Image (tube, coloured by chain):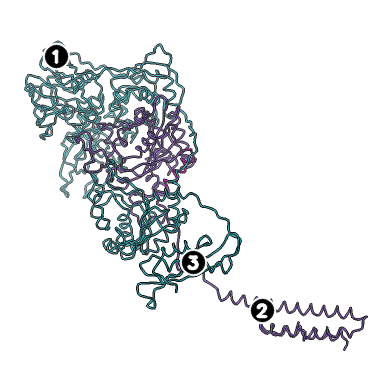
Amino acid sequence: MSVHEQIAEAQAEAVASIEQSNDLESLTALEPSLFGKKSQLGSLKRLMGEVDADDRASVGEALNEAQRIIREAHGVAKERFLSATRRDQLEAERLDLTESLESSPQGHLHLVTQTMERLEDVFVGMGFTVSEGPQAETDWYNFEALNLPAAHPARSMFDTLYLDLGDRTEIGDGQGGEATNILLRTHTSPVQIRVMEMMPPPIYTVCPGRVFRRDTADASHMPVFHQIEGLVVDHGISLADLAGTLNEFTAAYFGGSIRSRLRPSYFPFTEPSAEFDITCVICEGDGCQTCQRTGWIELGGCGMVHPNVLTNCGIDSEEWTGFAFGFGIDRLAIMRYGIKDLRDMYTNDIRFLRQF
Amino acid sequence: MKILLSWLREFAPIEGDVDQLTDHLSDLGMAVEDARVLDPLDGVIVARVADLRQHPEADRIQLVNVETTDGVQLQVCCGAFNMAVGDLIPFATIGTVMPDGMEISQRTMRGELSNGMCCSAAELGLGSDQDGIMILPDDLELGASLMDQLGLSGDVLWDLEINPNRPDAMSVAGVARDLAARLNIPFSIPEWVTSQGADSENGLATIQIHDGSLCPRFSARVIRGVTVSASPLWMQMRLILSGMRPINSVVDVSNYVMLELGTPNHTYDLSLVPQGHIGVRRAVQGETITTLDGQERELVPGDGLIVDYSDEPIGIAGVMGGARTEISPATDAVLLELASWEAESIARTSQRLGLRSEASARFERGTDWDINVLAVERFCYLLNEITPGGIELVGDVIDVEGNLPQRISVTVRTSRISMLLGRAFNSDEIRALLEPIGFLVEATDDDDVQSVTIPSFRPDTETETDIAEEVGRHYGYGNLGSSIPRSPDAGHLTTHQKVRRVVRRVMVGAGLAEAMPNPFLAPDEIPKANLRVDDPVRLLNPLAVEESILRPSLLPGLLTAISYNYSHRNRGVGLFEIGAVFDVSPDLAPLPSEHERLAVLLGGGDAFASIRVLETLASALHLSPELLNTDDLPGLHPTRGALVSLGGLEVGVVGEVDPGVLERYEIDERCGWLDLRLDLISQVSVAAGDASYEPVSAYPSSDVDLAFVVDDSVQASTIEDTLRQAAGEELHALALFDVFRSDQLEGGSRSLAFSLRLQAADRTLTDEEVGVVRQRCIDAVESSHPATLR
C-alpha cells in the first residue's frame, strides 16, 4: 500500500469511528485515537522522513487534508451531541406560564386624587402654581376677609361646621349666624386670602383641597368633599380674561368640543359675579337628561375679585384687579365615569377602588 | 320665582321665540330652572253638569251627564263628588292627550260607558288642587276651549332663580323691565289711579313711626265696602301658576300686588284697630303676640312690631300679622298697610321664628321704597275691579316717612368699566345700557366720568364696580370677548407637592389602593383603636355623635375600611391614605394643629411587610430609615412596633396593629401598619437633596460573610451600625442575610449572618487588606455587644 493509500484508509477509519459514536462521552473517549500521537495519522506523520523528497510535499498535503476532514467530522458530531443535551435540559425546564400563583398588581390612586392631579396638571401647564392651606380655619379667612361679615345674609349659603376648642373658642351671641370663630373651611377660598396676604401680585395660583359643609350625605352631597379654586391678580385683569382662562381650561381638561360660558350671578366675594357653565359632556350640547335638555351644565362660580377682598388682603384695588373661580372635584370625578352616587366614592370598598 | 309671559306683557310688548326669551332671561342672570309653554289642552272644553246619579254597580263612582253644547249630553263615569247640577267644569273629550301623556278614550266602567273625563286642576297642569273637579265661573262659554276661555292659550311659564342681589327681579314688573331693556322695547307701569275718596273723611286712620330706621316708609289707605268673596278665575289662575293658593278676594289681591310689583302688604280689619291708630316700634324683652296662624310668638328686642293705640302688638313687621286684627267675612272696612322695612331686621326675625314667606323673602333683600303709593293704588284698583258693586275709598293715601334712604349717585369712569370688563366702552354706550333699567346717567366736566344715580329698586348697587356688573350684564357676558392673561413665572408644583406625588406613586407601585375614610370619628373610636388621645378636637355642631370629633390619627378610618372589606370577604386588602390629622394645639394658637400624614394598613401583612413598604418609599426618596424597637406604641402590637427615623428626624411608627384592636374591629387577620408625618418626610427629603453619584469602581470586590450569636436585647440594626463603622470606607454594601434561632444557641440569643462586600475605588484589595477589615469587624462587634462570632 502506498503512503497515499494508507492515509486514505486511516481517514476513512477515523471518520467511520466518529460516525459510530453514540454520545458525547463515546466521542470524547475516541479523541486520542483521532488526534493523539498514537492515532493512525500520527503514526503516518512519523513516517514522513522515509518518504522520497519528491513525494514529500504531496504526502504532507494529503496528511493535512485528512486531518482537516477528521476534525470537521468530529466537530459536526460534537455539536450534534451538545445541542441534543441542551435541548434535553431546556425540555426539562418547560413551564406552563399560566400556572402563576402569586400576583402583585399595581395599586390604585383614589378617583378624587386622580381628578385633582389632572386638574393641577392642566393649570400648571397654564402657568399657575398650586397653593394649599389648613382645613380648620378662622372665621376671618373663611368669611370676613371674603366680604362676608358676621351678619351677612349670604352666610346662610354655607352650612358651616364649627369646632369646639373649649376656652379658645370665642362664642358670639348666637344671633344672625354669629358663632364660634374656628370652623372647618366651607370652601378653599381662605387659601386665596392667605396667598394674597403673603405674596405680592402678580398671582396666578389654584387652590385644590378638602372642604366641609354641614350637609347630610346623599347621592349628590357629602359633608366632606373637594374643590379647586383659581385666583389671578395682576395689572389690568378683566372679565374677558376670566372668560378666556376658563375657555382654555375647559378645552384642555374636557377636550376641544367642550366650551364654557358665563352667566351673571351673585357671590359676596366677587363683583361682577358669574356662573360658569360648560357644554354638557354627555350630549356635547344636543340636550339630554343630564343637562335638562339645555345643552349646558353648571360647573361652578366665578367673578372679578371684590375690591373689598383685595383691600382686606392689603392689595390696592385701584392698581390691581383679579378674578377667581371655583368648582367641585368630586362631581367631575363621578361625571367622567358615570357614577350615580357620590357616596360610592367613599365606601373604600376595594371592589370600587381597584377599578380606577 | 314663577313668571307668566302674559303678565310680563302688561308691562312691555314682549314678543319672540320662547327659546330665545329663555336664553335672554338666563343671560341676564335670572337662571331659568324651567320654561314651559302651557299645554293648549286641545280637546278640553267648558261643559255643564246636566245630571248626576249613582253608578248602579259602584259606590265610589257616579254617573254624570255633561252637556258639551246646547242640548248635547254625554255620559261620563266620575270618581269625584264635589260638583252640582248646573256647574261648569273642564271636560276632556275623547282623543284628548292630557299633560301627563294619557289619551282619553271611551271606556266601560262596571258596565257603564264613560265618554270622556271631568278634570281636576292638577290633571290639567293648572296647580296642585286634585281634591275634586275644577268648578269654573258661570260666565264661560259652553263648549269653548278651556284655555282660550282662561286666557292662557299659548302662555309661557318660566321658573327663574333670582340671586340675592336682585330684589327688583322678585316681581313681574322687575323681570319685565330687565327683559324689555335687553329686547330694546319700551317698558312702562300702567296708570291705575282709582280717583275717588280723596276729599272725604281723612283721619279715620293714623300712622306713627317710632323707629325710623326700622321703617323707612309706611303707606296706607282706608277702604270701605269690602266684601270678602272668591276672586275671579283669571286672578286665581295667575296666583296658582305663580305657586300661590287662592284664598279670598282681599288676600288674593294682596298677593297679586306683591307678585306684580314686589311689594308685600297687609290688611287689617279697621274696626278691630282702636281709633284706627297704628304705631311702628321695636319689641322689648318679654313681649308676645298671637300671629295669624294662631301661634303665640315670643319677641326679642330688635324685632319690628306693629302696635295699636295702646302700644299692644298687632303684627310682626314684615313677617306675619296678628290674629286680633285679621279680616273676616264680616269685615267691611279695611286698613291697607304697604310699608318698607329694614332688611336685616326682617331677616333676623323671620329666621329666628322660622317664618319664611314670600313676603319676608322680599323684605330681606330690600323692597323698593319708592313704589309704595303706586302699589296702594294698584291694590285699590284691583279690589275695586273684582268687587261686585265696587269699593269705597276713604280719604287720601296716608304716607308717612321714617328714615327714607337717600338716592345715591356714583362716579363712574368709562375707562375703569372698560378695563374691568375687558372691552372698550364709550360713555354713550354705558348710558344706553343703564338708563333702560332705571339708572339715571349724567355727564360731568370730566369726559371719562359720568354720574350714575341708582334707582330705589336696586339697593344692592352701591359702587362703580357694581355698575360695571350692570353694564356687563346688559351688554352680555358672552359678547365681551375673551383673552388669556399670562403669568410672568412658569407654572410649577412646590417641592412638597412633588414629594407627595412620588409617595403616592410608590404606594401604588407597592400594590396599595388609596382610601379616603371619613375624617370625622365617634368619640369611642379613640379607645377602640387604643390611641390614648385625651383631648381630641371636637365639633361644636356635628351632624351626629358618630361624626363629632376630628381624627387625631388615620388608624381608625383605615381600620374601618379594612373591616368593611374583610366583612365583604375581601381579605388581604392593602390600603394607604394621605390626609390631615388634628390635635388641640399645644401652644395657644387659635387653630388646632394639623399635620399631613401617610398611613398604610396591610390586611394580612405582618410587621416586615410594612417595613418593606417603608424601605421602598425611603429608597425612592434616596433616604434610609432607622428603626428603634419600642413596646406599647399607641394602637400598635405591644411587642411588634418601632419608631421610624429618617435623616435623623423621628417621622412616625411601623409595625403591626394591636391584636386587641383588630378584634374590636372584627378583623381576623394580622395587619401591618405604617404611619408617617408626610410634612417631615418632605422636609427630610429636601434636606437630603438629590441622589448623589459615586463613580463605579473598576476593581473587583471581595465578599466577607460574618455570623454572630447576639443577645436578643440588641437590635440587629445596632450590629449593622457597628459593622458599618468598623468596616470603614472600603465597605461597599452590607446586608443581613440570615436570622436563625435554635435550641443549640444560648437561650435569649439568635444568630445573625451579615454579608459585607468590600471594594476600593483605586485598586484591587489584597487578601491581607480584606483580612484586616474582617478582623476589625469581628473585634468591634464582640467588644461592643453581647455577641460572639459563630
Callout 1 amino acid: Gly
Name the quadrant containing residue A267: top left
Q: Mark 2: few, some, or many residues within 10 Å (few <14, many ≥20)? A: some
Q: On the rendered structure, is B579 left or right of A2?
A: left
Callout 3 amino acid: Arg
Chain A colour in the picture? purple
Residue found at the far bottom of this picture: A1
Q: Is residue B297 above or below residue A135?
A: above
Callout 2 amino acid: Phe
Task: Tell me the residue that label 3 is attached to.
Answer: B776
Q: Nearer the viewer, residue B51 or B544?
A: B544
Marks 1 and 2, how far apart at CA? 131 Å
Whichever of callouts 1 and 3 sits on the residue coming sooner in the sequence is 1
Q: Nearer the viewer, residue B636 or B8?
A: B636
Q: Chain of mark 3?
A: B
Marks 3 and 2, how far apart at CA? 52 Å
Q: Mark 1: few, some, or many residues within 10 Å (few <14, many ≥20)? A: some
Rendering coords of residue A119 (x, y %):
44, 43
Q: Secondary structure at mark 2?
A: helix
Q: Mark 3: few, some, or many residues within 10 Å (few <14, many ≥20)? A: some
Task: Tell me the residue that label 1 is attached to.
Answer: B395
Q: Secondary structure at mark 3?
A: helix
Q: Chain of mark 1?
A: B
